[in-house]
Structure formats: structure tokens, C-alpha cells
Amino acid sequence: LAEAGGGCCPGASHNKFAYNETGQVRIRAGLPIYECNSRCRCGADCPNRVVQKGIRYDLCIFRTGNGRGWGVRTLERIRKNSFVMEYVGEIITSEEAERRGQVYDRQGATYLFDLDYVEDVYTVDAAHYGNISHFVNHSCDPNLQVYNVFIENLDERLPRIALFATRPIRAGEELTFDYNMHVDPVDAESTRMDSNFGLAGGGLGSSPRARGRIECKCGAATCRKYLF
């Protein structure tokens, strides 16, 4: 299972086994993760079943104090490279995403994530359907990293979006990821967040891809000063 080619699900797709024996991701961001699925003979304890088990940590939604709206913090320590949560929402076409993006901009917040691992056809919209990832804020120095995961589906246009810890995370620490995080090995300009979770008010106007620069409030020492 350690190498690409043959054997289990990753090898059948000519990719490396993504996890170590404790379920921590061990491949670099940008490489896809292929987990075992319902057709496999292995059980729930298979080390290649991680994202499909869902959130395993106690997480909490809270109100930020610096104008970033709601945020998410962990109530327990998270080990480096551990799976934390999946970005979940309604899958829509990119054309519909453009239309909704203009509406969301007028409301002051959007929740659109382009699924452009290989081509920009679909988008995840977490505005009305989703999980706690709906509330995760941006940071220029994030503690979560995006990975593209395939489980019951091999259509590369429809990866599942999984967030893994980039470092050990303390109990009580806010969880963040970079909305401009590049993880696509084919196109470095691809696979980026199209929205600002924490934005409250402001009348942005235009669509996410066409609007002007948005000031970043993450407070990181390496802050780029602007989200987009």
C-alpha cells in the first residue's frame, strides 16, 4: 500500500497511500486522496477510511471580536496532519455560482468554493446546506490545509474537500484556512476559496471573481493585507 500502482484503492488510481497507521495525512497538498469505499472488503477500522468517518474532534462556533463575524475553535488538542472537517454544501454549476455570488455579495457574505481540481465546472455552496465548516474564517497563516478526496466517486470534477491540520493545534485555538490556498498540481492558479466567511456588511457589489480588493483582518504576522 505504500507505493502507487496495484493493490488498494489509491494504487488502482496510480496514487500513493495517503495516511500513516494513525490516520494522519502523509502526502503533500495537491496530491489527491483515494479512500476505500462501499465496494471494498475492508472494515471500518481500515487505515484508508478517514474523511468518510466525519468530524472526530469537539468543535465550537463563537463570535469573533474583530469584525470577522462568526468563527470556529477546537475544544481539544488536534495533532498535526489530522483530519479536522470536510467542507460541505450544495453542489451547483459554476454558472449558478456566478449568479448566486452577486446576490451574496449584496448581502455581505458568500460561501462558494470552486471544485476546480481538474476543471472549473462545479462549485460547493455552503450558504444554505452544510456543516460547521460554514463558519471557518480565512487566515494568511492558517492551521488547516485543503485536500481533494475521492471516496464513492472517481469523477475528478467532483472531489470532496477535506481540511487537515498543518501543525499541532491547541485546545481553544481558532481554526482557519487560506481562502486563496493553491492545491491544484495542474494549475497553480486553481482551487481557491471564492468567498469571505467572516465578512459582515459592506455592500461589495459585483461577483466574487470580478469584485475589488477586500481588506484582510486575520491579524497574522504574514498577513497579505487583502483577501483577494
Image (cartoon, grey):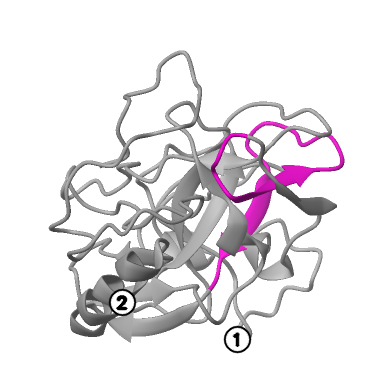
Horizontal side of residue 57 vs 125, given as left or right: right
Residue beneath label 1, please?
Answer: 39
Magenta region: 66-88
Q: Amino acid at mark 1?
A: Arg
How far, Cα to Cα, is label 2 from label 1? Answer: 41 Å
The picture quadrant where one finds residue 211 is bottom left
- Quick one: 63 or 76, which is closer to the camera? 63
Q: Residue at x 17, y 45 (%)?
A: 189
Say which label, 2 or 1, has the lower sequence index: 1
Horizontal side of residue 135 vs 193, given as left or right: right
The picture quadrant where one finds residue 123 is bottom left
Q: Amino acid at mark 2?
A: Val
The image quadrant where one finds the C terminus is top left
Q: Residue at x 29, y 54 (%)?
A: 191
**Location of residue 176 in the rendering, given as x and y in whole percent from the top left corner:** 56, 40
Q: Is residue 85 magenta?
A: yes
- Residue 103, labelled with which disc? 2
Q: Residue at x 37, y 64 (%)?
A: 113
